[in-house]
Amino acid sequence: MKILVLNAGSSSLKYRLFKDLKELVSGQIEHIGEDSGVKNHYEALLQVEKELTFRGQMSFKELDAIGHRVVHGGEKFTEPVKINDNVIEAIKEVSSLAPLHNPANLQGILMMRKLLPNIPQVVVFDTAFHQTMEPEAYLYAIPYELYEKYGIRRYGFHGTSHAFVAKKASKLLNKPLKNLNLITIHLGNGASVCAIKEGKSIETSMGFTPLEGLVMGTRSGDTDPEIPLFLQKVGLNADTVLNKQSGLKGICGQNDMREVEKLALKGDEKAKLAIKIFVHRIKKYIGAYSALLGRVDAVIFTAGIGEHSLLIRSLVCDGLEPMGMILEQERNKKNETFISTDNSMVKLMVIPTNEELEIAHQTEMALRDD
């Protein structure tokens, strides 16, 4: 089965082509609608088809299915669904919860339906994996009617990534996912932690929006709820400050952890501080989620920082030995899959994420079940 996975952003379009779940080609078109010569997503999709044809892969008409990433599914979607008019309307309804992402994601869907009306399309939601959380985990202690009227609750994000690495860990540990308790740590420019009990998400660090939780590239993560109100009182835009000017960038001026580490090695005190704050927050969540899970079989690092920064992994694991999490420094330096010692009660693992492959897999499964 040939499946094209699309991730449409407001001014970009990422794509990957899979055949029988093996990647054939990938690419990205940026600056759509700006000075790139690509006016809109429709033209971008035509360019994707030209690129695939030029590389000798196929034309769109040879596709068996298309899988789309959509950031927010609200409470309506707990699994991937085949696209129809009702699904499109439902995505529009929850777009107010992800105004920067859902409308752009929807553009890719609408344009592809226009180009290929007879090819089945499936949407996979970032929030779906976390819909197994219980009310005590997803509800905030605010007036209940605000949840009923506006849908204010914890949704969680990066669900596709957390689901992928959990399944991969199951294979590597040679144990059914339903028998495993895992803490998955997605560390990129955006970052989140997930507690997975017997294969299901029971808690995650991102909340109503992707702002909550860990320190990120430009996002603050957890803050006192009064801070946004205070920022507004002193004439600052709270959304801009907390989403675009905070996190690593807010502390030391750099949002890329690779650059932060370079500065820290040169003795930059603010870069050192940024790393300490970043690591401290992760440790807090590991401790909290260990308490919720009761038993932890593995802690998994993934995404850009998690997969490549041996320094961050080392600092995060330092001091966790009493919890049965013992890092083996040489394995960590070699970036091995298992970076814990042989006698570590909890396995420490590095698993590269592949959200597009997970979308392709879920697309295939959704069509088989249809």
Image (cartoon, rainbow, N blue to C red):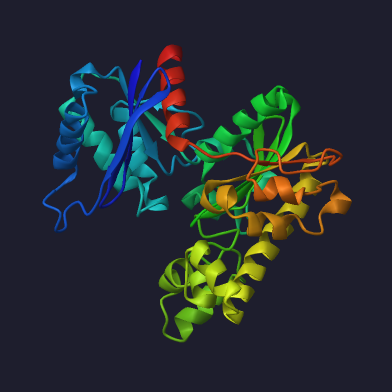
Relative to residue 183, is residue 68 drawn left or right? left
Residue at the spot 72% in from the left edge and 43% down from the top edge: 339
Relative to residue 291, is residue 121 drawn left or right? left
| Residue 207 seen from this side | no
Rendered-image quadrant of the N terminus: top left
Relative to residue 299, is residue 143 drawn left or right? left
Residue at the spot 60% in from the left edge and 59% down from the top edge: 214
Looking at this view, is 340 or 136 the one in front?
340
Relative to residue 184, is residue 355 drawn left or right? left
Residue at the spot 47% in from the left edge and 66% down from the top edge: 255
Residue 201 % position (x, y):
64, 38
Q: Is 87 located above or below residue 256 in the figure? A: above
- In the picture, residue 45 is in which quadrant? top left
Residue 294 % position (x, y):
83, 41
| Residue 99 seen from this side | yes
Q: Is 293 located above or below residue 252 in the figure? A: above
Residue 100 % position (x, y):
35, 54
Rendered-image quadrant of the C terminus: top left
